Image (spheres, rainbow, N blue to C red):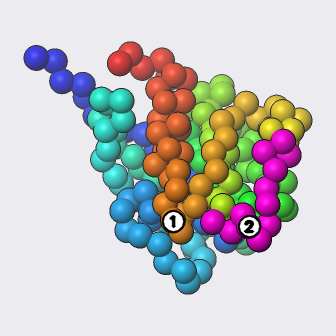
């Protein structure tokens, strides 16, 4: 019987500081949610083995600092990335506006695919009652910037749609890499 090999996916979590990149990574890895904010210094990474659509995947998840002071240091971490989650905070519209530069930067420096798979992730939807986000605004932003990216809304606090974000990214990587399943 043929066993599908394990695929290694290096992915980057990118976006401004305090949008929830580390919380999303922790939640996906089954480590729960921490309410206290600890800024990532440069980069942090983790490994996780999963199975998606019957395919064994080993995630190499690079969680990059979003603070401007670390921006130049992080560029070296993009090389070899197969995809990215571009994360913004639905309560902070400015964090959405900066995604264009984050996405362009990772696509230029990854050196893997002409159209590196990216999923835009609107995080902190558990705060939606306080500050509503507009799907039309997001769709307009994606179209106006020609980002050619998927979109999903999540809550690292509740865990809502965190797994879906990674599943969507895995499927996009498999399609872009033309991996036969």
Q: Is residue 103 above or below residue 6?
A: below
Task: Please provide the residue range marked out in magenta.
Answer: 126-138
Q: Is residue 96 above or below residue 111?
A: below
**Residue at the spot x=85%, y=46% of the render?**
137
Side (left or right) of 17 relative to 78: right
Q: In this figure, which residue is indicated by the disc labeled 1? A: 158
Q: In this figure, which residue is indicated by the disc labeled 2? A: 129
- Decide which of tag 1 and tag 2 comes sooner along the chain: 2
Magenta stretch holds residue 137: yes
Judge whether residue 33 can be spotted in this image.
Answer: yes
Q: Which quadrant of the figure contains the C terminus?
A: top left
**Residue at the spot x=41%, y=70% of the render?**
32
Give the crowd class for mark 1: few <14, some 14-19, many >=20 residues within 10 Å. some
Say which quarter of the image contains residue 113. top right
Identify the secondary structure beneath mark 1: loop
Residue 143's x, y, as percent? 84, 33
Total count of labels: 2
Side (left or right) of 166 relative to 85: left
Give the crowd class for mark 2: few <14, some 14-19, many >=20 residues within 10 Å. few
Residue 85's x, y, as percent? 60, 48
Identify the secondary structure beneath mark 2: loop
Residue 11's x, y, as percent? 51, 46
**Residue at the spot x=50%, y=44% of the render?**
164
Say which quarter of the image contains residue 17. bottom right
Q: Real-space Cα distance between discs 1 and 2? A: 15 Å
Observer-nearest of 90 and 11:
90
Residue 131's x, y, as percent? 79, 66
Magenta stretch holds residue 71: no
Q: Is residue 113 above or below residue 77?
A: above
Foreground label between 1 and 2 = 2
């Amino acid at each position: 019987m043929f066993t599908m090999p394990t695929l290694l996916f290096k992915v980057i979590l990118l976006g401004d500081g305090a949008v929830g990149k580390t919380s999303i990574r922790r939640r996906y890895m089954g480590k729960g949610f921490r309410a206290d904010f600890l800024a990532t210094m440069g980069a942090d990474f983790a490994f996780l083995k999963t199975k998606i659509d019957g395919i064994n995947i080993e995630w190499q998840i690079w969680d990059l600092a979003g603070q401007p002071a670390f921006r130049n240091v992080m560029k070296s971490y993009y090389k070899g990335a197969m995809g990215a989650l571009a994360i913004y905070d639905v309560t902070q519209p400015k964090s959405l506006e900066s995604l264009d530069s984050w996405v362009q930067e990772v696509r230029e420096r990854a050196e893997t695919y002409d159209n590196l798979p990216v999923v835009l992730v609107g995080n902190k939807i558990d705060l939606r009652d306080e500050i509503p986000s507009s799907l039309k605004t997001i769709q307009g932003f994606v179209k106006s910037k020609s980002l050619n990216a998927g979109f999903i809304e999540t809550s690292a606090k509740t865990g809502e749609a965190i797994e879906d974000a990674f599943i969507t990214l895995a499927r996009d990587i498999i399609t872009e890499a033309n991996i036969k399943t």
